[in-house]
Amino acid sequence: MSKDLPRDKNYVGKLGYSYRRNLHERFIESILFLSALLSVFIMLAIIVMLVKESIVFFQHVSIWEFLTDTQWTPLFDDAHYGILPLVAGTVVSSLVALCVALPLGTIIAIYLSEFAPFAVREVAKPFLELLGGIPTVVYGYFALLFVTPLLQIIFPELPGFSLLSAGLVMGIMIIPYVSSMTEDAMRAVPMHLREGSYAMGATRFQTAIRVVTPAAFSGIAAAYILGISRAVGETMVVAIAAGMQPNLTWNPMEPAATITAYIVQVSLGDLPHGSLGYQTIFAAGLTLLLITLVFNIIGHLLRKRYREIY
Amino acid sequence: MRDVNNLNKLRKIIGRHKRWDLLFMITGIIALMIAILTFIALFSQMLIDGMPRLSWDFFTSFPSRRPEAAGILSAWVGTTLVMLVTAVSAVPLGIGAGVYLEEYAPKNLFTEIIEINVTNLAGVPSIIYGLLALGLFVYQLGFGQSILAAGLALALLILPVVIVATREAIRAIPIAIREGAYALGATKWQTVSDHLLPYSSAGILTGIIIGLARAIGETAPIITIGALTFIAFLPPPPITEEFPYISFEWLTAPFTVMPIQMFNWVSRPEEAFQLNAAAAGLVLVVMTLTMNGLAIYLRYRMRKNIKW
């Protein structure tokens, strides 16, 4: 074998070149791999950080008390650590938001995907996207200083801070999110299903409701679930417009705090690092993360399913 | 006779179905109108309240106890510097991860875990990133309540946006481009850096702009870090007069940003401060709308111009 090799200096040089080239390639690949791996580390860091501080918290407060006590007053002398009032606030504000966002978002999506002429769609879609890009603190301002006074004309007994106005604005805020994902799911339904339906003499409305919507069901469900997770995690609108007083109520006309609003409230004060008050926000954050994680995983699985069918 | 009756019945049914069709179309337009009207109400409310406060002085004054003398100088300088940190850290990492997942990653369980993880990160509420930054950057790594900690927190937040945009832009490039490069003896990295990245640059740029627009308006994570709301001084300048002319002192300086300044003004009871909030909100909305508009325009042009 060896005698067949050309006795050329260049040959060795070329081998060296190719060796260097391979090394260079490997080096770059590992850098790229590390940056992809970073996302896993971020997730781990989030979990470790929340769990670590929460463990210290749960050494002082039993999980049973955390889940069943009906008062959340960690900063008072008579401290109670029941997450229920915060969860109730989160649930009520999210429900109000979803009552706005899901119907309107779905109707807009069906309209844009099945009814609207090309020109309307080309204008409406970027517009909705812009609406979704407005900072949440601006929506909070809008809820407090525009929607609340407006609602007080209809319901004179509505207080200055309420879950209702925060939830309504949050709903408007989530519309673009729900509508764009629902529309994507509906557009993924193959054209021949619609053509078949039209050929049978169905109107656009019948086609949309009886053919396209069932075919896009898992995608639409994913859009809803991710919308829910978004509403649960929303912070600034509720922090500004719903007040920050923990209040165990199911009535949207009252002020109350959500999990996120509580974290904001604590962060605005200056609690010393390592105090029990400091750890409460991590326990609250862990609760929030678990809730949204469940919704996200369900949404992800549903979305994967509709991608596989077509 | 019977045929005529049937025909009339049929016409009635068709008429009824067409009415439903029309009814839904009107409902759709109304729903769209609600979204549009909300936007108009939001914008005009801020315009009416905030416009009189918008003057040169508003941009060049520090926040103050007197509402009519207060301005957003420290806020917009802080936002600019925080965005600088965010962009410098999120852009290379996001593009790198996107390229790896799209071009290098083998199809195995581990890659799947990374992919699911990126999707999950995109769904984590922003305030959780704030808690992470509070525990990790502010205390564990000792960055304090600084521009660096805030910039990194926002970088983590927009990382999934950049990754997804990179992947979609690279995926849209036809396989023939890669085959052509490999046929000429290019290595993987040469293919990526000389062909795939330049061709997908517009798509990636769109993702970066959308991500940064989101980061500019993010309030919750920065509040969680514990950023002060009353800052009446500027961080040390990044360019100095003596050698080496560049200073990184500003990275560790305390700061405030636009959305925090606005939140601070909104939560005060005096109406004069709320007018300031409207003015700050107006600046903020114009900033994010411009960036998002630019991204939409870029995407529109890309769709029109690129024909593989």
Image (cartoon, coloured by chain):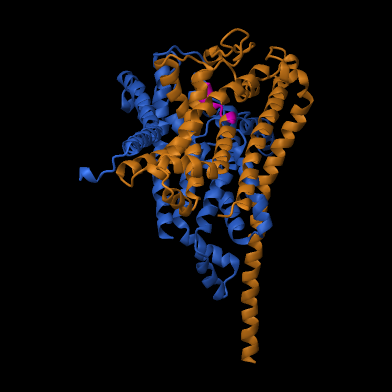
Chain colours: A blue, B orange
Q: Is residue B221 magenta?
A: yes
Locate the N terminus of chain B and report the quarter of the image it occupies: bottom right
Outermost residue to the bottom: B1
Can you give x and y, in whole percent of width and height, for residue B305 in the image? 63, 51
Outermost residue to the top: B242
Q: Is residue B265 magenta?
A: no
Can you give x and y, in whole percent of width and height, for residue A7 in the image? 28, 40
Outermost residue to the left: A1
Can you give x and y, in whole percent of width and height, for residue A177 in the image? 55, 44
Region rendered in magenta: B216-223
- Asked if residue B157 lies left or right of residue B51, the reply is left
Magenta stretch, main secondary structure, is helix
**Residue B225, can we see it?**
yes
Q: Quadrant of the rendered structure where residue B101 is?
A: top left
Q: Residue at x 74, y 19 (%)?
A: B58
- Taking depth in this image into account, of B183 and A286 the one nearest to the observer is B183
Locate the C terminus of chain B and report the quarter of the image it occupies: bottom right
Q: Quadrant of the rendered structure where residue A153 is?
A: top right
Can you give x and y, in whole percent of width and height, for residue B219 in the image? 56, 27
- Location of residue B98 with respect to B178 vertically, above or below: above
- Location of residue A208 with respect to A236 vertically, above or below: below
Q: Residue at x 63, y 24 (%)?
A: B258
